Amino acid sequence: MDNSIDTIMVLLVLMNLMLLGLSSLGTCIRVVAAQGITLGILPLVIHGGIFDIRLTLFSAAIVGLKGIVFPLLLSWAMRDVNAQREVEPFIGYGKSVIAGPLALAVCMWLGSRLPLPLDIVSPMVMPVAFFTIMCGLFLIVSRKKALSQVLGYIVLENGIYTFGMVLAEKQPLLVELGILLDVFVAVFVMGIVIFHINREFDHIDTDRLSSLRS
Amino acid sequence: MNLISIANSVLAVLLAPLMFGIINRTKAVFAGRTGQPLLQAYYDISKLFQKGAVYSNTTTWVFRAGPIVGFAAVLAATVFVPFGGLPALFAFKGDFVVMVYFLGLARFMTVLSALDTGSSFEGMGASREVTFSALAEPSFLIGLAAIAKYTGHISLSPMLAGINAASWGHAAPALALIGLAFFVVLLAENCRIPVDDPNTHLELTMIHEVMVLDHSGPDLGFIIYSSTLKLWLLGSVLIGIIVPVHSGIFLLDTVSSLLGMLGLAVVIGIIESTMARLRLLHVPQLLLGATALSILALVLVLR
Amino acid sequence: MSLLLLGLCVIVCGGFLALLLCNKPKLSSWLACAGVVVGSVLGLIPAITVLLNGAKESLRYDWSIPFGSFFIEIDPISALFLIPIFGLSALAAIYGTEYLWPYRQRKFLGVPWFFYNLLAAAMAVVVLARNAVLFLIAWEVMSLASFFLVTFEHEEKQNRDAGWTYLVAMHIGTAFLLAFFILLGSNTGSLDFDKIGNIAPSAANILFLLAVIGFGTKAGFMPMHVWLPEAHPAAPSHVSAVMSGVMIKTGIYGIVRTLTLLGQPPEWWAWLLIAIGVSSGVLGVLFALAQHDLKRLLAYHSVENIGIITLGLGLGVLGLSIGSPTLAVLGFAGGLFHVVNHALFKGLLFLGAGSIVHVTGTREIDHLGGLLKRMPWTGLTFLIGAVAISGLPPLNGFASEFLIYLGVFKDGISNGVQAVVLTLCIIGGLALIGGLACACFTKAFGIIFLGEPRTEHARHAHEVKLAMRIPMLILAICCILVGLFSPFLIRHAVFVITQVTSLDSQVVALELSETFAIMWRFVVAAVLLIVLAVFLAAMRKWMLRGRSVRSAGTWDCGYAAPSARMQYTASSFAQPLTYLFKPFLRTHSKSVSAKEYFPAESDFATETADISGRYLFEPTFNWINRTLSRLHWLQHGRLQIYVLYIALTLLVLLIWKMR
Amino acid sequence: MIPALILVPIVAAALSLIIRHDNLRRVLFVSAALTHSGLTFVAWSCTPEAILNGWLMLDAPGLLFLSITSVLFLAASFYAVGYLNFEKKQEKQDFEDGSFFTNTPEAIFIACLLAFLATMTIVTVSQHLGLLWVAMEATTLATAPLIYFHRHHRSLEATWKYLLICSVGIAIALLGNFFLAVAASKTGGQDTRLLLSDLIQQGNTLNVPWLRAAFLFFLVGYGTKMGLAPLHTWLPDAHSESPSIVSALLSGALLNCAFLAILRSHQVLSAAGQSEFSSSLLIVFGLISIIWAAVFILGQTDYKRMLAYSSVEHMGILALGVGVSGAAAFGAMLHVVNHSLTKGMLFFVAGNILAAYKTKASKDVRGIIGIIPASGVLWLAGFAAIVGLPPFGIFLSEFTIAKAMFEQHRTGIAIAYLAVLALIFISMSRIFLNMAQGKAPQGIPAQAGSETIFNILPPALLGVTTLIFGLYIPPFMNTALHEVAKAIGGF
């Protein structure tokens, strides 16, 4: 079953690289949606398809939220924001794609520093999780549009989830639902704010949101 | 304190004006004149005492207090100074400090009474007076400290009594330096050439004389009298050092001291008739030089 | 002790009442003033008794703050400082009721009075406190209260700046004191002074340095004195009197107390103190000479007198370290006696300056003149103060300086180097300081009170009200009496000196009685001087009897129409000395000099900025300011950068801590 | 009782959304705040029992922080009444650039405030670190609308930054939670629950490398919320753009909650014998924070931003205190109390000044004493209090921390600490004094009328309280503080 997990991990890495390279916001949103769905499957796979009502519910929730709700929300926010393409990011797509593998190397190193005490999952999980987190941060830092930053945030969240899956059964349900709820509201509020930003400035380039300084 | 020592003060009061006479006579001789009588200063003072007074209507009681306090302070200072065979009336540890500060008080009041007239000339004189005396005081006190160290006493009478021919034998350089320093201080404090010229009448160049321009009658008398006393006072300290005859035989000591004073007056006269006044800007250098001399003396005494 | 506490309570209550009734100016002023006076009288009784019988009395309550305990004690040292604190505060308060009166339309008088009473009480607590936290709280309350008094007229910018400089200086000083007390109490947990164990020499050295910087800032040592010439002119004059007369002495108190806590001092402490003393003294009086703002001049004289006091302390410490009781006793006696004397005459002089400002509205010496005729009482008292501060006999200023001289002469000039240094620093220094002080105060008194008025302000001056005259008179009389009775006072200082030097009281008593004998002769001589003066005055009267006594215009060397503007000015009076010392003073003068034969107008102005302020502190602060302001790009409003900070922090931490 | 503490504000929030009538809503608001603080007060006397099998429980730190929050919120609620009266409903002009804007509807504003209170309450009472995280994130979401009360673009920008930066931070903290879970998990045998008590109890069984990593993530994550430099970047913007009550609550209560979260993780590490690790990190961040604050307070032109940076400074001091530990832990806890009170007071007064002068530029504000005397006096008092002059409380706490530093021979740190404090004093005194004193600029109407009991009493009371704590610390509080200090490894 390990190789199935590994496949998922590789998928995640590829998606991250795509996100780094892609320029069209719409596509990015779809990629993120795909990532969410992939994550949704992960818990089932990790525990070897042993049917567990709690896990099933949980993965369903994830798929619903990350795979459907967020993308819809974002595309709704994008619709009346007349921003189809991310124009000149701070760090070009080419450079981003180069930066990706380097980050991956660092993550590998970190993973080697922190051996998982659990024997159940593949050694890929740690590095990939880190890598996803880094990609998320990278997106937030390097992109200009508020929307792409929300995307980055979601990717960051996904990374953390990838890690969380490893010990899904260590976490009480209450906490998980709380976390889900929080993430949901967070993204929702961000959507609203983006809407407002768009109305105030009629653009969503956050690099021009820098009147408050020192 | 033995009351005979009042004789010191009496002697000072009696003989001080004579010094002026001797100085002037010396100058006259050098200039080939007959010059004033030796007792001229006495005549002047008594004449002034018999005159009325004119007070500027700018002035206040400070102006009138000046000469009085000045004279009183100098007179009071004489009780600290031994002369010849007699120790001072008041001899106690650190008495010379009190003496110096009494003279300071006299100066303070004189300066104020000069400023009281509101005349710019007298203001100028006052300013110079305080400047030079502020520089003269350290040199005098440091010199005294050197003597104190040398003799091991810190009261003027034993200090001077402790200097005798023998001490000139083995500490001549130090004592000479101190003597020189004191001489400069004496010239400065009494406004003689080369620091000041007592009988020029160009106000801009004078120090002491210009301060008393407005005084008249008894006040002026007091002022002249106190300046002669001051000369006598410092003179007798200087003589105590450079005429080290402290045999204990009263007559010998006193006479030699008197001769010393005479010699001092003559020397001053000679200087006044041979030297010219220094430029005012150079006076400070002279005084600092005196300070340097006393410091050097101190170092010599200590080794 | 209970009396003392009662007194403090009365003072503070007076302040609060004044604050509550601050819309009724008269009532609040008088309540506050009464509070101070009554409280001070109550406080003086125990202070004097303790000083005379040398008994200690202490009081300790637990106090529910960290390391704090309400522990106060009155011992001879505290008593010695309490007496001027209470005395001067009370007199200045009486003066203040009249002085502040003209402000009643523009300001609530209750507020300054509240802070004034707070200041008085805080100073008392500072010298009483025996617990570090209590001490620091009182110390800072003192600074804060005086700050609000300094910025009483905060509408003027220079007053605000002065207040700020003062506050900053005080705070930096307090930072050092914080470190000082913490280290002091570090080997025993408690911060009560009596619980402090014996201290290792190395630690003692550090502690002493911290104390010198921390307390010296308050006392106004060169070069930490920068706040002094700013703050004193800004404050209302009765406050300046208290600040300069007693508040800066709390710094001296701190150093004395430190010496008692640290035990046997090494020799270099003494040299440090002497160096500070002589530099503060000489530079202080030089800068005073260069000023033409009266209150600024007086402020610099505070620096000078603090220098003299420090010389005394240094001499005493030297005596302790080389084991010469004579030096120790006479040094400390001179220094501490000068503390009291300076409180008297500096208080007097500031009150006098206050009266001048009160009636003429200017502090500019060159705008005044001829005031003696218009305000005779102020003039007389100011003259007495001037003579006293110039250290001239027979007044009190001379008595304390004489003690220091005596110390050096008696036992200072022993072996080589020390003798030279002592002679140069103390004898030469004191002589120079004395001479320059004479110059400075002949200038101040002569230009302000004598001659003819230079401006309209001065012309229309008049004598001040009784409430302002009485305190000055009392202080002037004190100056004379203390001067004449100094031997007896010295003989009663035995307990203080014993406590400070921690020598055997027999030795101290012996030394002091010898000093008594000496001083006694000096006093006789002084009396003789006075008698002679009186006699001569009578004699002159007798001479002039029946003779013509006319009054005419001043003889101006043939020039017919002298005018008041031709009089010698303060600046020109001081010029020879300022010229001589210009390397230190760096006086900046700007002048429009006369050019043609008939010059249209020419004008000349000088200002002497403080040397350490301009060449030490300003550059430092400007440098810090520039350097730090350059870092403001760090936060430039870019969200992306901010998130990058987070990411980088995380990465750095992971790589640093996980390797 | 704990359910009551949490439910009262939630219910009130729900109601305030329903209620149409303004005054009624305000009454509800204040009474909710009163009830909450009343309950907190009762909690001092009788410790409430744990619920949800120990997930929610009031231990000593929780109680302390809950009380601070509650008191501050009570003051804020009083102040809010006056504030909302003063704020005009209809569209109005922005005083910086003439653009027009409206305020968030009052109902939403109050509801969010109450929700904010509820979430902070949960933070203080929750013993389960996961739940703590949930509540933490909830505070972010509840406060975002509050910062966006004035609907103009600057506040929007501030809100956006706040939202994104804090969310990222919190996300990192979530990762920290997962790490902790890994550290707590055991191959075979029952894993340790993420309950504080369990973690502390079985501290020695935790996996050290993962624990350390977890602490790093907690520190960075919650540190972002707490405002430790260089993670604090949202703080000045949010504080300067949000209404003064919100700023007061952010500085006085929210930052403390984040600090509490860090304290919890510090407790766990100490229990695992890793206190050296966490202490050193706390000291590093503390130093960076105070220095950063000093740099930006120097020559600061906006007085609300200056206050915000001073919050950064004081958070740094807290971190230092906890890091130095020993007696400093007590000092830090005392500092938490004093700082919250003082900062709340200052922000309230800043609100009055803003209302009177219509500008946030400190150079345009002169002579407050003359225009609004009471606020002027409070402003000066607040200055004395915040820079740590006696007899105000902050002096004692800072003194205690400094003493502990010297006694542990961390002389370098102590010197840096004192020096930076002095520097901050210099720059702050300049700003404060120039604002309070001097002649008021032309065209400022004498606003004496604008000083009502609502906007003077709350700050005044807070000020008096911190003054009292500077002169006398009540025994019950003393014991409580010592208890907390023990809990976090000091004494």
Image (cartoon, coloured by chain):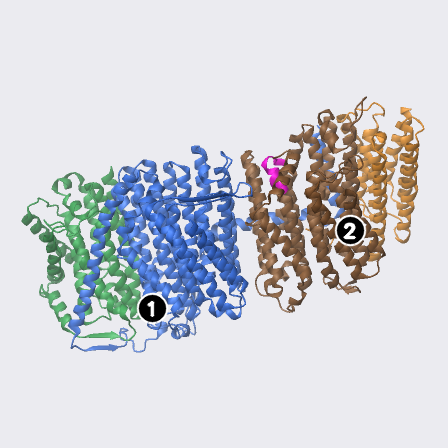
Classify the position of the C terminus of chain C by image quarter.
top right
Say which amino acid is labelled 2.
Answer: Leu
C383 w.r.t. B244: above or below: below
Q: C576 or C153, which is in the foreground?
A: C153
Q: Does C89 sit left or right of B182 as displayed?
A: right
Q: Is D183 covered by the magenta stretch?
A: no
Colour in which chain C is drawn: blue
Asked whether residue C141 is in view, the answer is yes
Colour in which chain A is drawn: orange
Say which amino acid is labelled 1.
Answer: Trp
Q: Which chain is brown?
A: D
Asked whether residue B283 is in view, the answer is no
- Reading the image, the residue beneath label 1 is C377
A153 w.r.t. D346: above or below: above
Q: Residues within 10 Å of mark 2 (few under 14, many from 20)?
A: many
Q: Which chain is green?
A: B
- For disc 1, the chain is C
The CA span between labels 1 and 2 is: 71 Å
The quarter holding residue D22 reads: bottom right
